[in-house]
Amino acid sequence: MDVNLVLVSAILFLASFTQSVSGFGVALISMALLPLLISVQSATALVALIVIIVDIGVLARYYKSLQVRDVWPLILASFLGVPLGIFLLRYIEEKIMLMILGIVLVGYSIYALIGFRLPELKRKGWAYFAGFLSGLLGGAYNTNGPPIIIYGTCRRWHPDVFKGNLQSFFLINGLMIVAGHAIGGSFTPEIWRMFLVGSPGVVLGLLVGASFDKWINLVVFRKIVLALLLVMGLKMMV
C-alpha cells in the first residue's frame, strides 16, 4: 500500500480518536496535518466526507437535546457562507489559504487554552453572523467549529443542548459542503480512494476513543491537543 495513503489513514484515525475523547478535533486535527501530505484542496474535500461519518455518530447520542429554534438561523446563514468558502478555496493561492488556516488554528487554540469567559449574548441575531462565518470557514477549510462553539458558549447553552445543537448544525452544514464540492468536481478518484481506505480508521478511532476516555485526563488531553494545534497553526503562518 502507498505510504502516503497509510499516513493519511493514520491522521484520520488520530483525528477521530481525539474527537471521541475530547469532543472536538476531527476537522481541526485533520486540516492541520493532512496539508503536510496532500494539497489543501484535496484535504478539504476528503475531510468534508469524513466529517459526515463522525457527525452522524455523535448526533445519534445527543439528538434528543436538539433545539431546532436555536439552530435554524445558523443553518440559514451558513447557506451563504459555504459557496463563498469553496470559491476562495478554488481560486486563492494555496500559500495564502494555508496562512489563513494557520490564523484560524492559532486564534481558536489561544481562545480555548486561556479559557476567556466571553459575555452572554441575549440577542439571537448574532446567530446569522456566526452561521455565515462558520459556513465560510467550513467551505474553505472544514473548520466550521470555532464560530459556532463561541456562539453557543455566549448563548450559555446547557452542555447536552450544546452538543445536540452543534452536531445537528455540523451535519447539515457538512452535507452542504459535500454538495458544494460535488458540484465543483472536487471529488476525484484519488479522494474517493483515500476516503474508502481511511473510513475504517475513522470508525475505529471513534470506538477506541469511546473506550479510552474514562482512562484519560480530559483536561490535560485537551490542553495537549490545543497546544499542538497552536504550534501547527504558527508553522502554517510562517
Image (cartoon, rainbow, N blue to C red):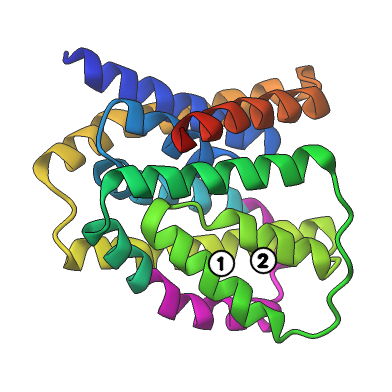
Q: Position of residue 182 (x, y in %)?
A: 20, 62
Q: Position of residue 140 (x, y in %)?
A: 38, 57
Q: CA distance from mark 2 to mark 1?
A: 6 Å
Q: Is residue 96 magenta?
A: no
- Compared across the picture, whether 127 is left or right of 16 comes to right
Q: Which residue is mark 2?
A: 165
Q: Position of residue 79 (x, y in %)?
A: 43, 78
Amino acid type indicated by mark 1: Phe
Residue at position x 45%, y 34% in the image = 236
In the image, is residue 183 above or below residue 115?
A: below
Label 2 neighbourhood size at 10 Å, few (<14), some (14-19), many (20+)? many
First to last magenta residue range: 61-82
Q: Quadrant of residue 215?
A: top right
Per the picture, the main secondary structure of the magenta-coloured stretch is helix
Q: Residue furthest front?
A: 238
Amino acid type indicated by mark 2: Asn
* SS category of the residue bearing label 2: helix
Q: Does the image show residue 46?
A: no
Q: Position of residue 177 (x, y in %)?
A: 36, 63
Q: Quadrant of residue 63?
A: bottom right
Q: Which residue is mark 1?
A: 169
